[in-house]
Image: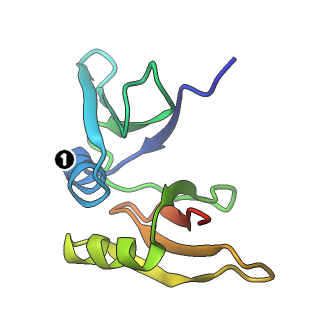
Amino acid sequence: MRILHTMLRVGDLERSIAFYTEVLGMRLLRRHDYPDGKFTLAFVGYQDERDGAVLELTYNWGVDKYELGTAYGHIALEVGDAAKACDEIRARGGKVVREAGPMKHGTTVIAFVEDPDGYKIELIERRR
């Protein structure tokens, strides 16, 4: 078994695709409308789906906002330099909600950014 994807419900599909592709550097891998079900699926990631896990962005037509709930935590991305990644994300219009620095009770350098729907994305600096 392997993880295929994580699904996020989004309120504005175009805005979310732009965030994940233009701000975080992922690629739009595929997109399909389901008129009978009144939803659209878009898959984004850093590699092809056959090579690793990706994100499924689900847009339910006519729904522009969701309650995130208290169970959701975050998506984690590995980066070479968390501070530099924050600067680049901010320069591309992304929202940094925790600047790069050591995690509480540890030494791993992390940062957090937020997507347009409020989902948190953790940036974990690769250990050198």
**Label 1: how many Cα within 10 Å (few below 14, some 14–19, many 20+):** few
116 vs 100, left or right, is left
Residue 49 in picture, x, y percent from top left: 42, 24
Question: Which residue, given by chain and number where applicable, does mark 1 sit on?
Answer: 14
Residue at the spot x=36%, y=76% of the render? 84
Residue at the spot x=37%, y=38% of the render? 45
114 vs 35, left or right, is right
Secondary element at tag 1: helix
Q: Quadrant of residue 69?
A: bottom right
Residue at the spot x=52%, y=75% of the render? 111
104 vs 72, left or right, is right
Residue at the spot x=20%, y=52% of the render? 18
Q: Is residue 87 visible?
A: yes
Given residues 21 and 125, the one toward you in this image is 125
Residue 39 in picture, x, y percent from top left: 31, 28
Residue 20 in picture, x, y percent from top left: 30, 51
Q: Residue furthest front?
A: 128
Given residues 61 and 12, the one toward you in this image is 12
Q: Is residue 61 visible?
A: no
Quadrant housing the N terminus: top right
Residue 30 in picture, x, y percent from top left: 26, 25
Given residues 19 and 76, the one toward you in this image is 76
Quadrant housing the C terminus: bottom right
17 vs 107, left or right, is left
Asked if 28 appears above or below 101 in the picture, the reply is above
Asked if 45 appears above or below 22 in the picture, the reply is above
Asked if 15 appears above or below 114 in the picture, the reply is above
Q: Quadrant of residue 19?
A: bottom left
Q: Residue furthest right?
A: 105
Amino acid type at circle 1 is: Glu
